[in-house]
Amino acid sequence: MTNKAKSVLLIGGSAVGKTHYGGQLLCRLQQRDCRLRMRGAAESLAPFEEVLHCLCKGITAGHTSASYQSVILPVELAGDREVDLIWPDYSGEQIKEILEQRRLSLSWRQRLLESDGWIFFIRLDQIRSYEDILSRPTRDLQARSSSAEATDFHWSDQAKFIELLQFFLFAKGVGTAMRVHLPALCIVLSCWDEISSVKEGTQPHELMKDRMPLFSDYISSNWISGQCCVFGLSSLGKRLDKEKPDEGYLARGPEEFGYVIQPDGTPSTDLTLPVFKTIDMAS
Ligand SMILES: Nc1nc2c(ncn2[C@@H]2O[C@H](COP(=O)(O)OP(=O)(O)OP(=O)(O)O)[C@@H](O)[C@H]2O)c(=O)[nH]1
Ligand SMILES: [Mg+2]
């Protein structure tokens, strides 16, 4: 039996659902029928107190302003493995700053060095993509390339995500001449209930390939296939209001809501699965 501290690095920009997932994850860890379970009490749940409080009232919590906080969660994995999971929460603005300034603080560098598993949150309903040769005739693109619009250039989100991963791998000293084994990578397509036109049974990696082909190709050509996976996640199960309490949440409690879509496309109410899978791949 091992009792090793596992630092899972949660990567995600603003409003991708990090804090609400953290809150729901804590609730689920108390339940017996999840793959990951608490085996003792956490010393402090301070970073998640507000979100837990709001969810019990059936409303959404606000944006995180704190710079970086983490909780140590003593958990056990199905089987006999025991792990101290270090689970963070922070303002997603930090990721934007890292990309814009191309600079890592010492503490971020330390986190990258210590982590063996990365969970990367992407919210597909907020992705910015650009027209290309497949989505728009070249005639139109040529006409626009000579216009003023061409000077107003922004990187697509896909390019930014690739840049971020390359930057993080470099800081961790991991090359890509060989496919990456560690850190294990779990991509989480968050707020799944908000993504338009998704057929039942869709495998999350297919959806990612369809909506983010460049990023998807980057992952599949740089990671060993067994060391990366894609989950869909709806931590809340539905959109919550800031003020008007949700009747279902009040009557049944937040633990009755939320689901994941597993890599093979099957849904599950066990919200601990993406973390379980990440720890498993990283072990
Ligand atoms: N529909 C839906 N909305 C969600 C879900 N998860 C989170 N949200 C909403 O998305 C918004 C952002 O969620 P947060 O958890 O605060 O996002 P964050 O990544 O912590 O954002 P920052 O604190 O700004 O970095 C909130 O309004 C949540 O109510 C979900 O599963 N479904
Ligand atoms: Mg937050």
Image (spheres, rainbow, N blue to C red):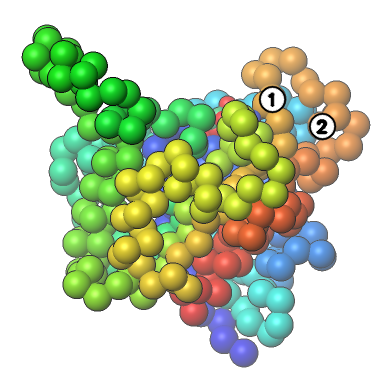
Residue type at mark 2: give it: Tyr
Does 26 sit left or right of 181 as displayed? right
The residue positioned 90% from the left and 31% from the top of the image is 251
State yes or no: Cβ of the residue under disc 1 lies below 8 Å from any atom of ligand 1: yes
Expressed as whole percent of the image width and height from the top left, the position of residue 112 reads 31, 61
Q: Residue furthest top?
A: 148
Examine the rendered structure and indicate whether residue 192 appears above or below residue 209.
above
Where residue 84 sits, quadrant-wise, is bottom right
> Could you tell me if residue 247 is visible in this image?
yes
Res 260 visible: no
Find out whether the residues at labels 2 and 1 contact each other: C-beta distance under 8 Å: yes
Helix, strand or loop at label 2? It is helix
Helix, strand or loop for disc 1:
loop
Categorize mark 2 by other alpha carbons within 10 Å: few (<14), some (14-19), many (20+). some
State which quadrant residue 192 falls in. top right
Quarter of the image where ligand 1 sits: top right
Disc 1 designates what residue?
Answer: 240
78 or 232: nearer the viewer:
232
Label 1 Cα neighbours within 10 Å, binned few <14 / some 14-19 / many ≥20: some
Image side of residue 133 versus residue 254, left or right: left
Spot occupied by residue 174 in the image (x, y as percentages of width and height): 23, 70
Indicate the position of residue 101 as horizontal and vertical percent values.
16, 38
Q: Is residue 66 above or below residue 180?
A: above
Q: Mark 2 points at which residue?
A: 249
Q: Which mark is residue 280?
A: none
Tell which of 201 and 166 is nearer to you. 201
Instruction: Judge by depth and name the residue closer to the eye, 236 or 104.
Output: 236
Q: Residues under labels 2 and 1: Cα distance?
A: 9 Å
Percent from the top left, x then y, of residue 23? 64, 44
Residue at left offset 40%, top offset 42%: 212
